Amino acid sequence: MVLHSLEPRVTLLDLLRDKLALTGTKKGCHHGQCGACSVLVDGIRSNACLLLAVMQDGKEITTVEGLGTPGALHPIQQAFIDCDAFQCGYCTSGQLCSAVSLIAEGHAATARSASR
Ligand code: FES
């Protein structure tokens, strides 16, 4: 995708969904409050609805489509299936991306480590 062909006001969320057909990332509030649009920008969880696409040039963007494949799910995706964690499913892609980042940031703990 050539970013310079985009209008400067296009959000990363709209670029992903409308121009790149990566519709796994959902549009909820479009105000940075719900997290449905969460993606990883250079490995950091970010609300795609609050980011201008043109400002992400050169950054690595990971959406839910990039976490795993149908035949090789990311461990977080498998955990969501194993634990029936989908709720309605609309926000699941954002929850998955946030969970991956939270673990990478060291915010996750096991029951054992949390009780110490
Ligand atoms: Fe709700 Fe982005 S759509 S935080």
Image (cartoon, rainbow, N blue to C red):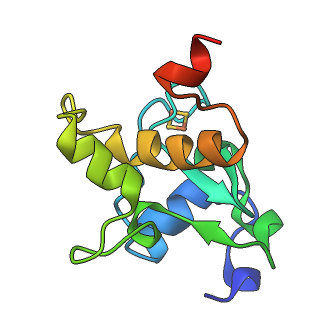
Front residue of 107 and 30: 107
Q: Is residue 112 above or below residue 76?
A: above
Q: Which residue is located at x 61 percent, y 50 percent?
A: 48
Point out the image quarter for the C terminus: top right
90 versus 43 height, above or below = above
Task: Tell me which corner region of the image, top left, top right, bottom left or bottom right, holds residue 85.
Answer: top left
Identify the residue at horizontal 64%, vertical 68% (top origin).
Answer: 61
**Can residue 12 be spotted in the picture?**
yes
Q: Quadrant of residue 18?
A: bottom left
Instruction: Name the foreground residue: 11 vs 5.
Output: 11
Residue at 58% across, 10% down: 115
Quarter of the view holding residue 27: top left
In the rendered image, the quadrant that contains the N terminus is bottom right
Question: Is residue 47 in view from this perspective?
Answer: no
Residue farthest to the top, as pictured = 115
Determine whether, in the image, residue 15 is placed left or right of residue 68: right
Q: Vertically, is 64 above or below 83?
A: below
Q: Answer above or below: position of 53 versus 33.
A: below
Image position, residue 32 (x, y; %): 62, 31
Most foreground residue, 41 or 26: 41
Q: Position of residue 13 (x, y in %)?
A: 54, 55
Residue 91 image point, x, y percent: 35, 37
Residue in the foreground of this view, choosing between 14 and 88: 88
Give the residue at x 70% y 69%.
Answer: 7
Q: Give the image location of residue 30, x and y in percent.
A: 53, 36
Q: How many marks are shown on the rendered structure?
A: 0
- Specify the farthest residue to the bottom: 2
